[in-house]
Image (cartoon, rainbow, N blue to C red):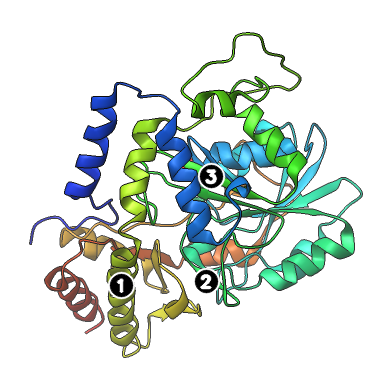
Amino acid sequence: MHKIRLSKCSISSVEKESVARVLDSEYLGMGVETQKFELEVARYLGVEADNFISVNTGTSALHLALSAIDIKEGDEVLVPSLTYVASFQAISACGAIPIACEVNPDTLFIDTLDARKKVTEKTKAIMPVHYASSAIGMNEVYQLASENNLRVIEDAAQAFGCLSDGYKVGKRGDIVCFSFDGIKNITCGEGGGVVAFDGNIISKIKDMRLLGVKKDTEQRYAGARSWDFDVELQGYRYHMSNINAAIGLAQLSRIEEFKINRQRIVKKYLESFNKIENVKVLSLDYSNIISHIFVILTEDRDELRNYLLEKNIEVGIHYKPNHLLSKFSSKYSLPNTESLYEKILTLPIHNDLTDEEQTYIIDSVYEFYK
Ligand SMILES: *Cc1c(COP(=O)(O)O)cnc(C)c1O
């Protein structure tokens, strides 16, 4: 069998034509395509046009969201240890301290009982991560936040297009951040976005993404530039270009296709692994999400991993817990997270994974346990 990729984007003639149109226009930076992408995403999420702000990566979305609510030196932000290092880096970029929390062993979503114990007078926010595209447990997070006067920044990098409690992730909440990097549910090549509902926060994020230049967005969307401007805030070069927006627009037009294919793949994995005693799957609301990754839990993780790699099947480990990294090492241990880290294995899932390839993957897992 040829090498089966763990994840990848799916590029069709739609994306190619969309990008060619921007190249032909010779306006490659932020402009009308970016504006159109924002309008279409807002419409898709069911929020007002103003509530969605595009940026260049999911990591910058998180960084801007934290900055906009004034997270600063010495503040503490609760975050699950089992997440991509981007969540932690965005917090430390503000000078704040990420407080690594446990996850629920059945869903790998932040364990709010543990998070509650870690609240101090320095805690300013909680950053739940929609691990494997699932936002199961958000009610408890918002409950904890309201009891302790915390802001909530949802790291929804993996959850674009997913439903939680009957609502699209991003439709409501405090601040919700998405990623559109090369392998996420939809890609812009690289990209990200923030949903916020507070006008003050929205205008701060809009200015900060463009070096703090006040109201530069309006100028750029009109095909103009700001010459006589003021700057009040620390800003960054975090805006989205027309090229990336064009890829995103094409991908958004295909999201139903992505949903159908990813859900079909998940369904087959679930049915197949039901029959293997030693393989556990996460307890997620799979029919309402578009799974970015498919994670199994097994005591034989390393052996199975090597077996599949030898069969030319790319597998992954999402993630090495952040509290085990030098920069973010904690004085306390997280026993549940550390034990889960030994068991998690991510199997291939992407829009173009064929039925033949998936059968080969499943047969290989069966063979291993035979
Ligand atoms: C992808 C991802 C990010 C970062 O998004 P980028 O666009 O790659 O910067 C943050 N958190 C999680 C959980 C992710 O999966």
Q: CA distance from mark 3 to mark 1?
A: 24 Å
Does the closest atom of ligand 1 sit within 8 Å of the Cβ of label 2? no
**Label 2 to label 1: alpha-carbon separation:** 14 Å
Image quadrant assignment for residue 172:
bottom right
- Please give the name of the residue rendered at 32% of the width and 42% of the height, measured from the top-left corner: 247
- Mark 1 Cα shell of 10 Å, populated few (<14), some (14-19), many (≥20): few
Left/right of residue 154 with respect to residue 305 in the rendered view = right
Q: Which type of secondary structure does the marked residue at label 2 adopt?
A: strand
Q: Which residue is mark 3?
A: 193
User: Is residue 189 visible from the viewing direction of this image?
Assistant: no
Please state which amino acid type lies under the numbered disc 1.
Answer: Ile
Q: Earlier in the sequence, mark 3 or mark 1?
A: 3
Q: Pointer 2: residues within 10 angstroms few (<14), some, or many (20+)? A: many
Q: Which quarter shows the C terminus? A: bottom left
Q: Residue furthest left?
A: 1
**According to the image, label 2 marks what residue?**
163
Q: Which mark is residue 260?
A: 1
Q: Position of residue 129 (x, y in %)?
A: 59, 58
